[in-house]
Image (cartoon, rainbow, N blue to C red):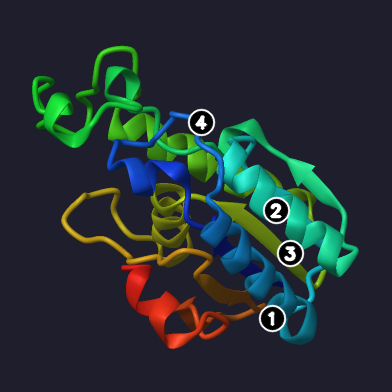
Amino acid sequence: MQILLIRHGESEADILQVHEGRADFELTDRGRKQVRAMAEKVKKDFLPEIIYASTLKRARETATVLSEVTGVPLQLEEELMEYNNGVQAGLAFEEAKKYPRPVHLHDRYEEGESHIEFCMRIETIFSKILAASTQKRIAIVAHGGVINCLLRSFFHMPISQDFYFLNGDTGISLLEIKEYRKVVHFLNNTSHLDADEVLKSF
């Protein structure tokens, strides 16, 4: 089975310079253009048989466009939502500094979830998706933090926060699970965006 991991396009939070997480922002006009380019690329080169997606607006809209362009069915999964950052969600970066950053993996922002809880949530839904899927290629449309957890799960890595997999707007990763080994075809491919778009995605 091949697994496409796709990050959503640019959201309004990127323009407003606020923390996103569970804050439910929509895509920007630029983000919608990014998504359209990504969808055409996936249709041409990596057509999946089913799309799973987070229910948050920025990912849901990304996945909906992908579904419409490719004609592939879409299944929304609440468990694919981004890290629950509690009271920090939607706050400007400076304002959010009044809330101490969690120190330990079991710590959390008020009204949020710990890093351990987040990773276990993503591990669980990933396991369920893989167990239920009979397709040769599936797509998962989600968020940067979610994709990091999915990659850690795929690689059997610890849940430590000592490293981070960079994912640009509409970045595409292609993984494969074979009978005797796992294959990484590529990570964070943004070649469907023009040079200026690629540079602005980081």
Residue found at x 20% / y 24%:
107
Distance from the alpha carbon under mark 3 to that under mark 1: 15 Å
The amino acid type found where label 3 is placed reads Ile
* Residue at which label 2 appears: 63
Distance from the alpha carbon under mark 2 to that under mark 4: 15 Å
Mark positioned earlier in the residue sequence (2 or 1) = 1
- Residue 150 x/y as whole percent: 48, 55
* Residue at which label 1 appears: 41
Distance from the alpha carbon under mark 4 to that under mark 1: 26 Å
Residue found at x 49% / y 79%:
190
Residue 138, numbered label: 3
117 over 137 or under it: above or below: above
Q: Are marks 3 and 2 in contact (CB under 8 Å)?
A: no
The amino acid type found where label 1 is placed reads Lys
The amino acid type found where label 4 is placed reads Asp
Q: Are marks 4 and 1 in contact (CB under 8 Å)?
A: no
